Image: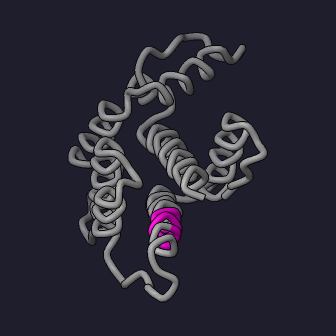
Amino acid sequence: MILDKNLDINTRFSQNIRIYTQKVNNKSDKDTIIISVSIIEEILDELLKHRLAQVSQVAELPVMSYQSKVDLCFKMELIKSGLRRTLHIFGNLVENFTSPDNNNGYGNLIVQANILELCKINENDIFNLILNLVNSAPTIEENYEKVDDLIEDIGWSGTMKFITSIISASLVEALVELK
């Protein structure tokens, strides 16, 4: 995680996206999901620990589930409701990928529906900015109007990595603001 406040937000944001991408590069779909949730959970832990330290020097963060951490971050106003919903859907994806079912990958319609919902929830300024950057690349032949338009070209796995990289970088920015 790059937390350097001396860097401008665009540089820090893109560096955190790059760090995420390096961590999941050449991993299986299941490994990518597991690594992604551990990265996100680590940032949630840092947000909660920092907020807790502001209130009490002796209090410790209790052991809790991923979903509980998301809800607590929301209740402590560390994240907004859209990000809370995004993180809950992401938690559902992790459960789908780690279940013992034979069809627990991107071919599963429930997984695909969750990814499409993530795209819909996150059609915001940050995603649009990233899409504009993607569209401005000289190697891009077709412009993308929505995040879910990427699915056709980069597939479910690539789209999931794209969304998760932005989510993790956004959470890091929340941590930078808190510090």
Up-down relation of residue 104 to residue 139 (above or below): below
80 vs 130, left or right, is: left
Give percent across and percent down for residue 30: 44, 61
Position of the C terminus, as image quadrant, is bottom right
Give 48 or 21, whichever is nearer the viewer.
48
Give percent across and percent down for residue 13: 64, 41
- For the stretch drawn in magenta, the main secondary structure is helix
Which residue is rendered at x = 51% and y = 39% of the image?
162
In this picture the colour scheme is: one colour
The residue sitting at the right extreme is 6
Give percent across and percent down for residue 72: 31, 65
Give percent across and percent down for residue 163: 46, 41
Does the image show residue 172? yes
Which residue is rendered at x = 48% and y = 16% of the image?
144
Position of the N terminus, as image quadrant, is bottom right
Span colored in magenta: 42-50
91 vs 152, left or right, is: left
Q: Quadrant of residue 134?
A: top right
Up-down relation of residue 22 to residue 94 (above or below): above
